[in-house]
Amino acid sequence: MMKTYTYQTLPAEPLADRKSRRPVVVAGAGPVGLTMALDLAVRGIPVLVLDDNNTVSVGSRGLCYAKRPLEIFDRLGCAAPMLEKGVSWKIGKIFRDTELVYQFDLLPEPGHQMPAFINLQQYHLEDMLIARARELGEGLQLHWKHKVVSVQDAGDHLRLGVEAPDGLFTLEAEWLIACDGAGSPIREMLGVPFTGRAFQDRFLIADVLMKAPFPAERWFWFDPPFHRNQSVLLHREADDVWRIDFQLGWDADPVEERKPERVLPRLRSMLGEDTAFELEWVSVYQFACRRLDRFRHGRVIFAGDSAHQVSPFGARGANTGVQDADNLAWKLALVLGGKAPEALLDSYDAERLVAADDNIGHSSRATDFITPKNAASRAFRDAVLRLARDHAFARPLINSGRLSTPTPYPGSPLNTPDTEPFAGRMRPGTNCSDAPVRAGGEDGWLLHQLQGDFVAMVLGGENASEDLDVDGVRCRVLRIGADVEDSEGLIAARYDLRPGTTYLIRPDQHVAARWRAFDTRAIAAALRRATARD
Amino acid sequence: MPLNTQPNIENPDAFYQRLVELHQDRSEEQSRLINASLVLLLANHVGDASVLEEAMRIAAQTADQP
Ligand SMILES: Cc1cc2nc3c(=O)[nH]c(=O)nc-3n(C[C@H](O)[C@H](O)[C@H](O)COP(=O)(O)OP(=O)(O)OC[C@H]3O[C@@H](n4cnc5c(N)ncnc54)[C@H](O)[C@@H]3O)c2cc1C
């Protein structure tokens, strides 16, 4: 039924070399597996991706991609087509009945390259990641219709059973990154528990093709006249497609509700009899919030939905999964290169479990607001919505989904604690804020300067050394004022820089340590800590 | 400041009467909404998380009393 998108059948080419041991196999070519593979490949690690299917995401699914994942995609060289095709937005509006009760702006601050959010159907996003993967050549191999069916730990490597169109074979790998989605078969193979809460509600997701006058904003209705006692969410997607979510309640029949004769009247009562529209995709969902106890199980490491699952309110699933990959890739690259101990991989657990809990917390609270569990919580919810129109205090209590923002790691074992006071939010464990710069006579962005290696960023830096090599790990020195110009003064403002102030920044663009003076010994010690070598 | 659980309402009978009157001729659903609004308004006025926490603790206990 889709007018705006045609699925390609991806080639199920047989894997030629089944003998040599692979440093990394990624199972699953969803947004997370593909990001993982790209990040390893740009770091020079050969990677093999196996996916049991031969198409990209069936249905638009993940729609809203947040600023931080876009920064990661930019680092991996594939943000430009996403920005071009995606619908950029930052305003969210909340209605009760017919009245606007609250409005929020997700990016009130200028001076960032990436928008707060873009909306892009997941199949487009995956196509773009695959196109980028193909540019990277032999280092990144993608094999469709190759399913991982067994995992066996052989001490210093794994033996993977793979089911391919031409039969079953065994493949050796040092590491398996399980990005095989919410239903993760690999989780089942390992028998690791995946626990949490399932929510007793159902939602109808309809992608509708129409020319509509709505702006590119997120509109959320509680109890609108066209869908009484339930909620509705509207988003603009690429190609004049609109995502409409109808809350249905627990008693709804998921099979019946998907039928056009049930869906079309709901849409007509919302859009009006005169609006011409066509259905692109329809699905009925129920949601759960769950996670694994830990993400690393020996040589098998889980990332994305296989490791943690959230409800879609807040657009957190793919967004946080992409940040799992961002966190893991540089660590795995150092371990494989013999430059850091395996213990560095345990910090992936430490850091990303905190993020998973943060996401699950946000997503559970939003779901509790949208689907009150009893009469008392419904009364509080309705009271908040009614009070909000005239009384400002009630507005921040409205929770239609808190949209995905990165979770900082202030308690990470990789951080070196501050010894001097700093203002602002760039404390160790935080992802680096972007800012405009001028470099080589051209306008650019700070985050482009913080790619690849560790970076020691120093203001002025007359006393700074050349690039450092700490036991084989490179640390580039970036002198603000000399190598790049802080064209609008926003680096100094956002990082609370004074002459000599030095930040040690990790390869995933997170702050590891900071000081008021450039000291190579302090930098080396902090870098050792940030690579789990002390 | 800790939660004040000493008498603090100037005219207890008048206040109590007003509270009851709020619910006169209201459906159960409307009553719940009024009570919820009242809790939210007063909680915001108090603001202090530890005071609110203490009030919620004592309130929850009333449901466990025989
Ligand atoms: C209605 C809806 C709306 C959503 N909206 C958003 C949103 O706005 N923003 C957001 O960030 N997220 C959103 N999400 C969540 C998002 O779709 C998921 O979080 C995301 O797809 C997870 O990516 P993944 O790569 O971990 O897993 P998946 O995308 O599920 O990919 C897993 C892949 O693994 C493959 N596979 C499975 N088993 C094997 C095996 N044994 N061997 C090899 N391959 C295997 C599968 O075929 C699949 O290709 C939404 C989800 C839904 C359902």
Image (cartoon, coloured by chain):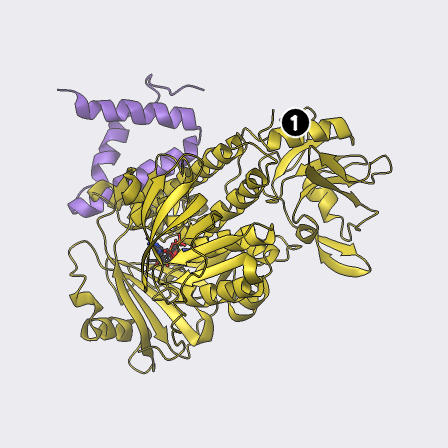
Chain colours: A yellow, B purple
Q: Which of A332 and A266 is in front in this view?
A: A332
Work out which residue is located at the far front of the displayed protein and give it. Answer: A19
Q: What residue type is labelled 1?
A: Asp
Residue A442 visible here:
yes
Q: Position of residue A316 (x, y in %)?
A: 42, 50
Q: Position of residue A160 (x, y in %)?
A: 36, 47
Q: Where is residue A435 in the image (x, y as percent from the top left)?
A: 69, 51
Q: Position of residue A259 (x, y in %)?
A: 20, 71
Please state if A359 lies on the left or on the right of A337 as rendered. left
The chain under label 1 reads A
Q: Please tell me whether mark 1 sits on a helix, a strand or a loop.
A: loop
Please state if A469 lies on the left or on the right of A194 as rendered. right
Residue drawn 56% across and 54% down? Answer: A41
Please state if A222 lies on the left or on the right of A8 as rendered. left
Q: Which of A424 and A524 is in front in this view?
A: A524
Image: A295 above or below A263:
above
Does mark 1 have its CB less than 8 Å from ligand 1? no
Which image quadrant: the N terminus of chain A?
bottom left
Count of labels in the image: 1
Q: Which residue has dot 1 on it?
A: A418
Image: A519 above or below A482:
above
Please state if A224 lies on the left or on the right of A462 as rendered. left
Residue A425 visible here:
no
Work out which residue is located at the far left of the displayed protein and give it. Answer: B66
Image: A237 above or below A18:
below
How many residues crowd mark 1 within 10 Å: few (<14), some (14–19), many (20+)?
A: some
Work out which residue is located at the far right of the displayed protein and give it. Answer: A462
Residue drawn 19% across and 66% down? Answer: A257
Q: Nearer the viewer, residue A522 or B49?
A: A522
Residue drawn 64% across and 55% down? Answer: A112
